[in-house]
Image: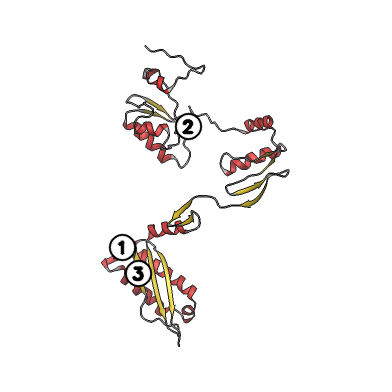
Amino acid sequence: MATFDTNKDGTISPEEALEVPRRNLMLLVTGSQGERRAASAQLSRGKYLGVEMREGDTFLFSSKTIPGNEREVLRIWNAFSEKGVNVIDDTGGKYHVSGHANRPDLEHVHRLVLPDMLIPMHGEHRHLREHSRIATEAGIASAVVTNGMMVDLSGDVPEVVEHVETGRIYLDGTAMVGALDGVVRDRIRMALNGHALVTVILDENDQPMGEPWVELMGLPPTGRGDRPLVETLEGDLASFIDRASRKLLKDDVKLEDEIRKVLRQVAMEEIGKKPEVTVVISRLTAE
């Protein structure tokens, strides 16, 4: 039997752990929330630092799953299950002990540090507000600061003086595109819903010249009854424009909006989805 000199807390190195009988070994690993590059996920897929989970081993998830991470965590659990590993979770609350500081802990840290100012950084927004309130009650100048806020700390209290753009930025060709400026969102909508371009030509008397022209992208070619979808849309739009009031035909903005509504409604009836719609109105003027 191999023997090892352990640290005062009883730990040994990962290399030494490989020589310990499995029944006498416990590993503490990262990845309780399903992080793909953490140790738990890598062990569920194969070896990690020379360690491999085998049939009959036990894996204890002592943490509580954060809402939104369920799918990733369950993927790891099922991968272990397929290996024959016994997975134990915290159902019933027997194993989990929170590592988050409660109010007495925070107040104790405040007394130790004695800060002039305090800006909470950990937790959700409601946690930040509560921590700031606790600090304020203790006479500590505090402020809740979120991403993008620039704070002046030169005075007696922290003061938000400016906001800057934050978040992901994408390289689109040679242009930098912000994740929240609408470009990415528009592309996602078009990818999911398809796109329809409608062109309407009106003469100098606000009367339609011929039928509207529809061009589709990313949509099925036929609707109900195998009739070409373009024909159905163009026919229904032509009927709508023929019935439209003279007042509506004079107002490009309102006419575009009504055409968009009609096309999306007809498309929903024909193919079960509402595409993104671009309406182009061209007006002929007398020479």
**What amino acid is at disc 3?**
Glu
Q: Which mark is residue 220?
A: 1
**What amino acid is at disc 1?**
Pro
For residue 58, side relative to residue 146 (left or right): left
Q: Name which quarter of the figure residue 200 lies in.
A: bottom left
Could you tell me which secondary element the residue under label 1 belongs to? loop
Q: Nearer the viewer, mark 3 or mark 1?
A: 3
Which residue is label 3 attached to? 215
Say which label, 3 or 1, has the lower sequence index.
3
In whole angstroms, how far apart are the C-alphas of marks 2 and 1?
47 Å
Closest to the observer: 59 or 91?
Answer: 59
Q: Marks 2 and 1: CB-CB under 8 Å?
A: no
Q: Is residue 83 above or below residue 69?
A: above
For residue 139, side relative to residue 215 (left or right): right
Percent from the top left, x then y, of residue 13?
A: 44, 21
Say which label, 2 or 1, has the lower sequence index.
2
Which residue is label 2 attached to? 63
In whole angstroms, how far apart are the C-alphas of marks 2 and 3?
54 Å
